Image (cartoon, rainbow, N blue to C red):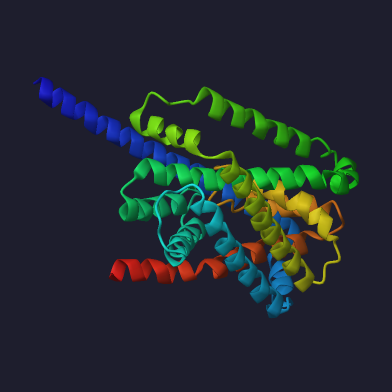
Amino acid sequence: MARALKTGDSARGRLQKALKKVLFLALKLTVSTGLLWIVLRKAGLQRVLHTIKSMDPWFFLAAAGLYILGTFVSVFRWRLFLTARLTLRKFFSLYMLGSFFNTFLPGMIGGDAVKGYYLYKETGGMAEAMASIFMDRYLGFSALMLIAFLAYPAGLPYLKGKGLAWLVPVIFAAFLVMSLIFFKLRLGRRIKLLADFYGYFGIYEKRALLKGMLISMVVQGISIFSIYVLALGFGLTVGLPLFFVFVPLITAFSSVPLSISGLGIREASFVLFFGAVGVSPQTATALSFATFLSSAAGSLPGLYEYLKIKKG
C-alpha cells in the first residue's frame, strides 16, 4: 500500500514537472510571438524583407566568418579552466557543437548542456566540465558588461534623450551584486554535485582568470564588430563606438529566459536602441534578423561535428 502511494506521488511529481515545462515553453512562445508581432506591425514585414534582400551578401559572409573566428578564440579561454588535455581541434569541435545547439535549440542553455555532456564523455568529470562551461560563459558576459560600461559615455547622449540613461549603470551594478551573491554565498553548496562545482572555482588561478577576461574582451569585440559589419551591409552610418554600448544591452535583454532563444526580445531591443540614433524600425529589425542568421550560418559547422560524433 505504502509503495503504491509512493509510486503515485512520484508519478504526480513527474506530471507536475512536465506540466511546468510545457507552461513555461508556452509563456516563452507567447512572449516571442507577441513581441515579434508588435515589432513587425511597426516595421512592416514586407519592408523588412526588402531591406534584408538589399544587403550586400559579402557583408553577411564576413559576419558569419567573424562568428567562427570568435568561436575559435573562445576555445583558448575555455581551455584555461580544464585539466583535460584534449587537442585544440577537439575543443573547437565541442565548442562549435555547443554553438549550433545554442542557435537551433529553444533556450540559451541547450548548447551548453550538449557541450558539457560530450566533454564529460571525453574526460569523465561532470563537475569540472560544467564548472569550466559556466566560467567560460561568465567571463564572456563579464567582458560584455565591462565593454558597455567603458563605452557608456559614447552612448549617453542618445540614451539620455530616450530616458534610458540609467540602463548601463543599473545593469552593470546588478551584475556585480549577483556575482558577489553567487560566489560569496555559494548557493546550493551542500548539494554534492554543486559543492564539487564550486570547488573548482577555488583552484582557478588569478592568472588564468585575468587571461580569460582578456580573451573575453577580444571575443566580445569580434562579436560586436560582426554586427557593425552587417550594419555597413545595410548602408548604415552609425558610429562603431555606439555598437559597443547598444549590443551589450541588447544581449543582456535577449539573455533573459522569457522567450525562445531571445526571439522577439532581441528584435524589440534593436528597434529601441538603434531607433535612438535615427535608424528606421524596418532597418533595425532587418539588422536583428541578419545578426541571428549570420550566427546561425557561422554555427552550421557544429552540425557537421555532431553528425561526425554520432556516426563515430
191 or 230, which is in the foreground?
Answer: 191
Q: Quadrant of residue 65?
A: bottom right
**Along the horizontal axis of the image, is 121 left or right of 255?**
left
Classify 237 as above or below 190.
below
Residue 35 visible here: no
**Residue 20 picture location, percent across and down:** 40, 36
Which residue is rendered at x = 77% and y = 39% of the image? 168
State the residue lying farthest toward the left. 1
52 or 301, which is in the foreground?
Answer: 301
* Quadrant into which the N terminus falls: top left
Which residue is rendered at x = 42% and y = 54% of the image? 115
**Along the horizontal axis of the image, is 89 left or right of 117?**
right
* Quadrant into which the C terminus falls: bottom left
**Residue 301 picture location, percent across and down:** 48, 71
**Residue 109 picture location, percent across and down:** 47, 48
**Residue 302 picture location, percent across and down:** 46, 66
